[in-house]
Each structure stands twice: as structure tokens, then as C-alpha cells.
Image: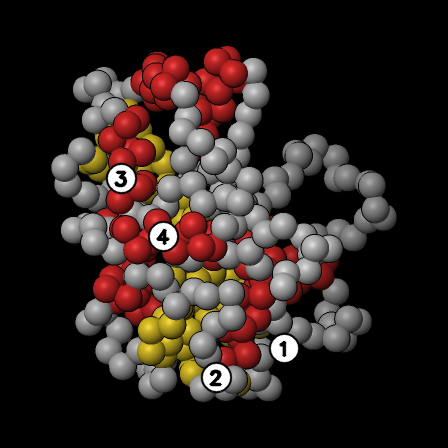
Amino acid sequence: MSDPAAPTPLIDRPALARRRARAARAPELFLQDHVAEGLLDRLAEVNRSFTAPAVVTAWPQVWEGRLPGARIVPDDEVLELEPGAHDLVLHALALHWANDPVGQIIQCRRALRPDGLFLGAAFGGQTLAELRAALGQAEIAVTGGLSPRIAPMGEVRDVGALLQRAGLALPVADVETTRVTYADPFALMRDLRAMGESNALTARLRRPTRRAVMMEAARLYAQAYGQPDGRVAATFETIHLAGWAPDESQPQPLRPGSAAQRLADALGTDERPAGETASGAGAGRTGTGTGTRAGIGTGTGDKAPD
């Protein structure tokens, strides 16, 4: 029996499984294919050979022939991974459907040998921003309320922080944005359904959405995001993650206070008390370590790259 005091899970996993089973018959999973290629591109940049890889994915057909010798593991709540069995683990486009994302990464880290590599890819917070806005405005206008329709997806800083929480060393996160155009908003919704990415939230509306809501959403979508050729744009943001299982051979941070030279001397500047600025100095800019890659929208039929 389930614990009545336990929190209600965000994702309805049985419903998600039904959607994926239907999508498994789809002739094309273009987003999953695109993300798989992105993961392999990043893997190719690593100057190391891996002999015991594993891929956590809901789409084994996408990985057929892509990573020879890899063990394919379903993205269940408890992953079928043995501790220390792999030198490479990929988590491919499934973290956004996890009720416990950090738990998924922890399980991957435990499956890694020392100095093994974890690579992950998950949809980020800007994914389907256009659809989320149009549906929300339409539902409020027509019904006066709002129901959960698109799973919440994290921003790159939040998702990247999961790597540290999971105990991975040398964490890196970057963002890839893929923009795709569709004939109309309904073509986008059909594509999401065909890829198993339709609404599987536990708190979702359990009855068909009113036609008036859908028609108003389509109107608002076309009005706000229509293209000169009459098509509409959709954004898919993929957050790519990388981290290593801790090992003594990895670079270690220096102990605080162990520097042999002052920073001011190394930079060739004068040292001043906090709050004091040099005469004529301009305002500084603060950068982040997060990279952004331009994406490529691919596909056939009702969708086309933007």
C-alpha cells in the first residue's frame, strides 16, 4: 500500500509510460535523434577511450548503432545500474520527466568507476515557452482558471547545480537552443504527442480541454509567434551536463591562503580597500561560465528548421 503521508509525485509515471508506448511506433523521433547526436559530439571532444558505457534512455531505438557496446537502461525511478560498473554513463533526454532528477544523477554517479564520465541532456526552462504562454492566456480568458499543462523544466544554473549535489567533480553545463517551425500550433501538439512528450503531470486536467480554449490558444500563438511565411515557431532548449566521478588524479582546488603571489601583483594593478575605485574606472561586467550553442531544427512533414 502507498503511504498516504507521502508527497504526491509531480509526474504520473504510468501515464508517461502509456504515452511513450504509443510514441514508440512513431516513424520519426527527430528531437531525440538530434539530442543523441549532440551528446555524441560532446563525447568526441573528450580525449579518452571508454570501454564500458551505459545509456539511460526511454528510446532504445534512437541509440541503436550509435554507441557500440553500450548497455541501454530504461529511465525508471530506480535505474538498473550496478555500482562501479561503467566508465561512461549518458542520461539522454529523460531528466525532465524524473520525479527525483538529482536522485537519477546520483544513481549514475554511483555506477561510474573513479574518474568515469557522466553526460546528460534534459529539456530546459525555455522549452515550449510559446505554447505555455498561449495555452495559459487562452485558458484564463475562456475558463477563468489555469491547469498544469507543461512539466516545469529547470534553468541551466539550477540543473547544473544538480551535478554538484550528486557528488560529481568538474561540473559543466551548457545550453543549446533549437527552434523549429510548424504549419500551425496544432501540428506542434500532434508532434509532441507522437514523440511521447505530451502532458503526463499528475495534476493535469483529466478531461478533454474545451474546444474554445484550444482555438483561442491557436489564435494567440499565431498572433504572437507567427512567421512571415505563415508558419509558427517553437523553441526547444536542451541543457547539456557533464561531470566526473571523483578521483585523486583530478585537479584539486588550492587550499585557501596558500597562494605564493598577490592577485594584484599578478594582474599588474594597485590594491585598494573594498569599495574604493580607481579614478576614471568604468563599471565592470560580470560574466557566467555557461555557454550557448546555436541549435539546428530538423525534421520533415509539418515541421521545418527555422
Query: Label 2 crowding class (10 Å Cα cut-off): few <14, some 14-19, many 20+?
Result: few
Q: Nearer the viewer, mark 2 or mark 1?
A: 2
Q: Mark 1 and 3 residues: CB-CB less than 8 Å, in contact?
A: no
Query: Label 3 crowding class (10 Å Cα cut-off): few <14, some 14-19, many 20+?
Result: many
| Side of 90 relative to 282 (left or right) | left
Q: Nearer the viewer, mark 1 or mark 3?
A: 3
Q: Nearer the viewer, mark 3 or mark 4?
A: 4
Task: Identify the residue shown where x is 49% and y is 33%.
Answer: 205
Closer to the chain start, of discs 2 and 1, is 2
SS class, disc 4: helix
Q: CA distance from mark 2 to mark 1?
A: 28 Å
Percent from the top left, x then y, of residue 87?
42, 82
Instruction: Write down the residue under mark 2.
Output: 82
Task: Identify the residue shown where x is 62% and y is 71%.
Answer: 167
Q: CA distance from mark 1 to mark 4?
A: 46 Å
Instruction: Write down the residue under mark 1.
Output: 252
Q: CA distance from mark 3 to mark 4?
A: 16 Å
Closer to the chain start, of discs 3 and 4, is 4
- The three-letter code of the residue at mark 1 reads Gln
Query: Label 4 crowding class (10 Å Cα cut-off): few <14, some 14-19, many 20+?
Result: few
SS class, disc 3: helix
Instruction: Write down the residue under mark 4.
Output: 18
Q: Nearer the viewer, residue 236 or 150?
A: 150
Task: Identify the residue shown where x is 55% and y is 59%.
Answer: 101
Q: CA distance from mark 1 to mark 3?
A: 46 Å
Q: CA distance from mark 3 to mark 2?
A: 35 Å
Task: Find residue 110 and report its image quarter.
Answer: bottom right
